Image: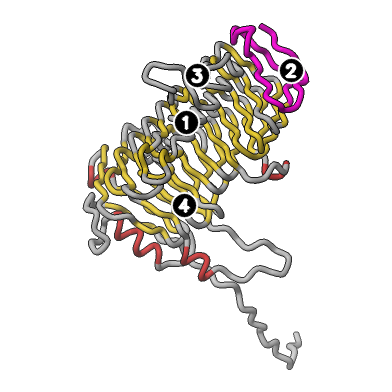
Amino acid sequence: MSTSKYRVRPNLVELESRETPAVFNVTSVEWNENLEGTLPYAVKIANSKAGRDLIQFSFAALGNNITFASDKTLDVLDEVTIQGAAMGSGQSVTIGGTKPFVFSHQTFFDTAPVPEPGTPPPTPSSTIIGVKFKNCTAAGGSGGAVEVTGGDLVLSLCRFESNSATAQGGAVNVGANSQLTVSAGCVFELNTATQGGAIGSAGRVVLTSTVFADNQAKAIVGVPIIGTVGGYGGAIYTTGIVTSDGATFSHNYASRGGGGVYIAHPSKAVENASTFTGGQFQFNRVTETAAAGGALTGDGGGVCVAGGFVKVSGTTFLSNAAGSGGGVSAGANSTVEIKSATFEYNSASLAGGPDRGRAIDVKSGASVSVQGSTFISNGIRGTYFNNGGNTFTNSPDE
């Protein structure tokens, strides 16, 4: 047997850097970023580590029902997953107090690799699973429990109850360049703000089978020079985009417009369209009246589209009420397409005038089309109120 006199020199190839995600176990309910084992400490250390880290809670150490009282907002600078209680486990993680989280993802933006030419930059994303936010507040600000100012946030199996913000988004506020994705199993209940009782957004909100109940947007009256401020979007107020699949809006209230949802996107371009597929708006209401006990004055008991392009398909509007547009109100800078929807027992009672679109109200300049939809017991008079907008494509079916 012969052997070669030549030796092969190994060729070393440099591999890309890989960071191993860190796992943090929360073993204390103290809200102290300098104390190891606390949630604030876990967030602080996770911020200093590149890559998505995992924060989980030790039910063995803290019991099955863990409660935190926040006295300082935590800024989440990098990607993280906060893993709370599993569905059906009999366990719970509840956070209350001062707004617990702002997701800005600053570290990610600072350390993310430069993308190839023509490739969109990566978007950071964090996730919260199985956490209840109750009685959180943002005094003088937006996002009573959570604010997203950079990147994306995904919520799964979370509950937001009785949170409040002085400005926008009683539970969550979403910035212009951010996205909030709310997956099935999330509930927003009894949250309040000046605008967007549950969610305020200038970015994108994606909903799947989400429940919004008893949220409220309360106007502030008597503001010097300005007069009355806010009061729009009992559940959601947005100047961005909403994509909703199977969401339920029930018993939400707004002082001045959009008992369920208020949309004020500046563009009517189809690529900026908000969409509502399936789901229902029921018993939502605009509460402002011309005088105590008088007729209602605001627009859009279910949905008020002050501006933008909105598509509605297969959605039910039941027993919503407003001054005009008990089900849907379309403003002057809006395009609304409605297909296969059901409008039943909605009401409108504008002060000093006739019923103004118990089902749908169309303002001058709006463009609204309705196809294959059903209208039941909204009242023969005022089912549609067309104040100079375009012509509908099908007729009321009372």
Graded by Cα atoms within 10 Å as few (under 14), some (14 to 19) or many (20 or more), the crowding at tag 1 reads many
* Position of residue 335 in the picture relative to residue 133 (left or right): right
Q: Amino acid at mark 1?
A: Arg
Q: How is the image coloured?
A: secondary structure
Q: Amino acid at mark 2?
A: Gly
Graded by Cα atoms within 10 Å as few (under 14), some (14 to 19) or many (20 or more), the crowding at tag 3 reads some
Q: Can residue 177 be found in the magenta stretch?
A: no
Looking at the rendered structure, which numbered label has been put on residue 351?
Answer: 3
Q: Position of residue 135 (x, y in %)?
A: 29, 39
The residue at the point 41 percent across, 61 percent down is 22
Q: Position of residue 30 (x, y in %)?
A: 21, 53
Label 1: element kind: loop
Residue 376's quadrant in the figure?
top right
Residue 172's quadrant in the figure?
top left
The residue at the point 68 percent across, 37 percent down is 309
Q: How many marks?
A: 4
Looking at the rendered structure, which numbered label has been put on residue 372?
Answer: 2
Looking at the rendered structure, which numbered label has been put on residue 148?
Answer: 4
Q: Disc 1, disc 2: CB below 8 Å?
A: no
Q: Tell me which label, 1 or 2, sits earlier in the chain.
A: 1
Is residue 353 visible in this depiction of the protein?
yes
Closest to the camera, between mark 4 and mark 1, is 1
Looking at the rendered structure, which numbered label has been put on residue 221?
Answer: none
Specify the segment rendered in magenta: 369-398
* Position of residue 341 in the picture relative to residue 17 (left or right): right
- For the N terminus, the quadrant is bottom right
Is residue 83 visible in this depiction of the protein?
no
Q: Can residue 376 be found in the magenta stretch?
A: yes
Provide the residue designation for mark 1: 256
Q: Tell me which label, 4 or 1, sits earlier in the chain.
A: 4
The residue at the point 43 percent across, 42 percent down is 169
